[in-house]
Image (spheres, rainbow, N blue to C red):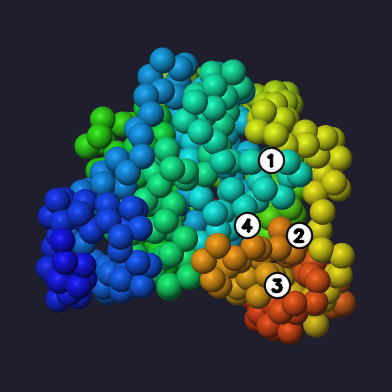
Amino acid sequence: MNPVAFIAAKRDGHAHSREELEAFLGAYLRGEVPDYQVSAWLMAVFWRGMTPEETTALTQVMADSGHRLDLSAYPHPVDKHSSGGVGDKTTLVVTPILTACGCTVAKMSGRGLAHTGGTIDKLESIPGWSGDLSEERFHELARRVGLVIAAQSKDLAPLDGKLYALRDVTATVDSLPLIASSIMSKKLAAGARTIVLDVKVGAGAFMKTHDDARRLAQTMIAIGKGAGRQVRAVLSSMERPLGHAVGHAIEVREAIATLRGEGAEDLRELALALAREVLEAEGMDPARAQEVLESGAALEKFRRFVEAQGGDAGVVDHPERLELAPEVWELRAAQDGVVAAVDALEVGLAVLALGGGRLKKGEAIDLGVGAWLAKKPGERVRAGEVLARLHHRGRGVEEATRRLNQAYRLAADAQTPPLILEVLR
Ligand code: URA
């Protein structure tokens, strides 16, 4: 295999065969092709795209780079994945709801990508919690707890792990075939029967338009159905961040509050909508989702899950143990009005500037920095009231405060657009 010829083929707009993808990416996984050649290829894919057949082949090569797990022996094996958003802590709410309803949620998640947060980084803000699991341990937790969340490892979709980290720092995240194959390779490898995809649309999402998001959803549904899975997709707005919190520890705090029945309405609405899709596809009663949230059963499942993966389960009763960066900067309203918009991309970039995301591969990130959006779109505010707070340690504050300022738009009056735009089944 000649890596230069392979890169040139994509640069010139040709399609790769499955064998060619296997040869190039297999060599990358074995350390025989360096990051710089794969980065060049990713950028060529970004510009040239891939045919549906190529995207499916890439997904299969990535899913087969580790083991494919068989979860068919577990009750209702289900999974959920987001295409990436700002303040998107939905997994932390949906998965315990589904487990409390009797499903087995054994899933693989990712770290932050570009300006969006990742579930694994967020959960690592819980002291002791780890998503580095062997295949054996993954099965053991699926069986014993009914909820397990793993990072990509040498056993599970290792190629996605490597490509994901490289895309994050080479401006090659927002490519339909790369997102579809990244998400679906993890879903196929983890082995769930039913998968619900939360496909984000808008300023803070990788898909900026409804049409592009629909195309991404349809591509992923086709890949999943082709592999014999039930797949549904919920298209949801990422014009504004989800909930009040954006960051890591601060988002886990908000997820726990939501599981206690105290969280933001948009987060609760989306989490319940996603859970209902899964339950319905599994032939279960969708009304159970709300019941287990309100009874506290989902919160108890979250507690068990944290403990089982080595985390301090005390954070469930004492979320203040999830440490936030000590310095606080406040954005106040310059005039009376209604919050007309909170630009999700600007908020995501503000948290990235504070050290909450990576600019280099493998870089350590600050899990304590973040934003608290006290006022959300549609809320009326008085001049001088706090709109939002940044938790920081001094790094990147100038850029972050400028971005947060730009993110908020006040008007005399405003309508809040719908959160859920479409469901594809
Ligand atoms: N989530 C993933 O797992 N991969 C992507 O590329 C985007 C979101």
Is residue 29 positioned above or below 288 on the image?
below
What's the residue type where badge 2 is placed?
A: Gly
What's the residue type where badge 1 is placed?
A: Trp
What's the residue type where badge 3 is placed?
A: Leu
- How far, Cα to Cα, is label 2 from label 4? 14 Å
Please name which of the two marks, 3 or 4, marks the residue nearer to the observer.
Answer: 3
- Where residue 74 appears, x then y in whole percent? 45, 17
Image quadrant holding the C terminus, namely top left
Q: Earlier in the sequence, mark 3 or mark 1?
A: 1
Q: Earlier in the sequence, mark 2 or mark 1?
A: 1
Element class at badge 2: loop
The residue tagged 3 is: 354
The residue tagged 1 is: 129
Residue 166 location, quadrant: bottom left
For label 1, being within 8 Å of ligand 1 is answered no
Image quadrant holding the N terminus, namely bottom left
